[in-house]
Amino acid sequence: MQPLDPTDPRIEAIRRFNRFYTQRIGVLRDGLYGSGYSLAEVRVLYELAHANRPTTATELIRALRLDAGYLSRILRRFETMGLIRSTRSTDDARQRKLSLTAAGRKVLAPLERASRDEIAALLAPLSPAAQRGVVQAMTTIESLLAESPTAKQVAAEPCVLRAHRPGDIGWIVARHGALYAQEYGWDAAFEALVADIAAKFLKRFDPSRERCWIAERDGENVGSIFLVSRSPTVAQLRLLLVEPSARGLGIGRRLIDECIAFARSVGYRKIMLWTNGGLDAARHLYEAAGFALKCEERHHSFGKDLIGQTFELKL
């Protein structure tokens, strides 16, 4: 492919957008969100917090494209402050595994909340349609410039994750009832259970510690997931659903990742979920995200003999 001429107006258009957007989201400030931490430092904390396992400096360099010397200085500072722990890898004695400490998560949590609040304020003046347009445009930019073929596939089928709105909860109940009857032969008792879970969520909803996300594609709901509080330290993942027309696009994985990220940001120590044997696609997603099976029990529900399964993820 022929490289662009440096004077090509498309180059200046992208540079202009970069200047506009970095100013709007405040990355030029001295200390992100008044924290005393640079953007690069906060990104390192974020990557360590959202990795499903301890990671290495080499993996951080690859993920963030940071200079090795610069990253080394950041990691030394964080280790001195007690924000990260470093242990020798059992697989390769030359590598050290890095993970956040409780102090590190305590530093990151208010920064993640501030970031979410800032983006929410950025979108608030826009109509719902305009908000969807902004997010879809960003998804397209990210995907087209990414190296992953999977990301390019998602660009062709953009999906937006958003908070629930009036009418969404009724859709969740109806689609669970219809799909589980169609795909597994479950009776109306399952739809009644989903309706009860959804009603309790609306009545007791604590937005500071709970969420319902809707996956939306081309203006249509195609998926959902809930994270609800079980205790001050334990959250529960509930009602994961992806429409058949949207399966295979990574939407289920994105919904689960969003739950995990939010749970960590508000201070939960563990996420649990209850499901049933035979739901193999969902189980694969849970295990890929790091959930481990803790117990099983036989029961007769929804007109079927089932095996209930409890999974847990330590954060």
Image: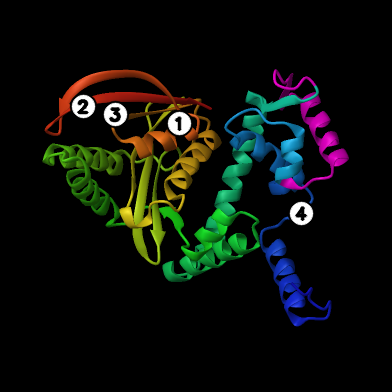
Residue density around tag 4, few if under 14, some if 14–19, many if 20 or more, within 10 Å: few
Examine the rendering and report whether any part of residue 258 can be seen: yes
In the image, which is nearer the foreground, mark 1 or mark 4? Answer: 1
Amino acid identity at mark 4: Arg
> What is the CA distance from the residue labelled 3 to the residue labelled 4?
50 Å
Residue that numbered label 3 is attached to = 277
Residue density around tag 3, few if under 14, some if 14–19, many if 20 or more, within 10 Å: some
Amino acid identity at mark 2: Leu
Query: Is label 2 in contact with label 1 (beta carbons under 8 Å)?
Result: no
Residue that numbered label 2 is attached to = 306
Residue that numbered label 1 is attached to = 287
> What is the CA distance from the residue labelled 1 to the residue labelled 3?
13 Å
> What is the CA distance from the residue labelled 3 to the residue labelled 2?
7 Å
- Image side of residue 185 versus residue 238, left or right: left
Q: Residue 183: x percent and y percent?
A: 22, 45
Instruction: Name the mark on residue 295.
Output: none
